[in-house]
Image: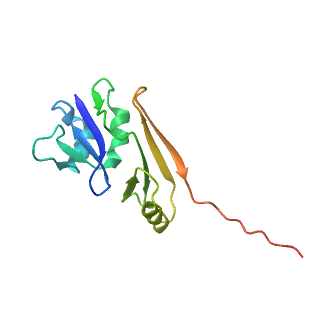
Amino acid sequence: MIRAKLEKNKSGKIIFKLKVDEASKDNILFKRALMESKFIKGKSRYEYEVPLRFFVPIYNNVDKERFSLDKKSIISYLEFSDHYDQNYYTDIDATAKYMKKWREEGCPEIYRITIDIENHEVKKEVVFKKNKIEIKELQL
């Protein structure tokens, strides 16, 4: 059984917590995600804090009967990345600080990722993009 939870920590960052059974740890998708994750110490229902960019590939490629998303999990968030996909920026709402970072990174498309728990689907749609301004010549 695989359990997951998306939650916001005290600093406002969205974190992806994951618990994977031993049989699934051999899957190459989980191997890559667990290599980049942090182990959670102490008593917790989840073992790993995984980078959020792995959530969509894991959710789309895992058998839904074996995957369980926590009831208190975040089901919608915003995401964009820099030009080289090295840094991912996520937030629940489009705050002033988030939009400032968006402008600093060159205004890439911002996606809203929405999780449909009933149909076991992830919907990814563009919600913000840079408007193109065209200047036409004025004829006199």
Indicate left or right for 126 with 82 as reference: right
> For the C terminus, which image quadrant?
bottom right
Residue farthest to the right, as pictured: 140
| Residue 14: image location, x then y, percent | 32, 50
Q: Is residue 139 above or below residue 66?
A: below
What residue lies at 31% left-to-right and 32% top-to-bottom? Answer: 71
Indicate left or right for 21 with 15 as reference: left
Residue farthest to the top, as pictured: 65
Q: Between 138 and 31, which is closer to the camera in this rendering?
A: 138
Q: Is residue 43 above or below residue 9?
A: above
Write down the quadrant of residue 67 in the picture. Answer: top left
Total marks shown come to 0
Indicate left or right for 66 with 132 as reference: left
| Residue 23: image location, x then y, percent | 18, 30
What residue lies at 47% left-to-right and 46% top-to-bottom? Answer: 112
> For the N terminus, which image quadrant?
top left
Residue farthest to the left, as pictured: 42
Write down the quadrant of residue 83 in the picture. Answer: bottom left
Q: Is residue 112 above or below residue 84?
A: above
| Residue 30: image location, x then y, percent | 25, 40
Write down the quadrant of residue 31 in the picture. Answer: top left
Q: Between 56 and 7, which is closer to the camera in this rendering?
A: 7
| Residue 43: image location, x then y, percent | 10, 41
Q: Is residue 132 above or below residue 66?
A: below
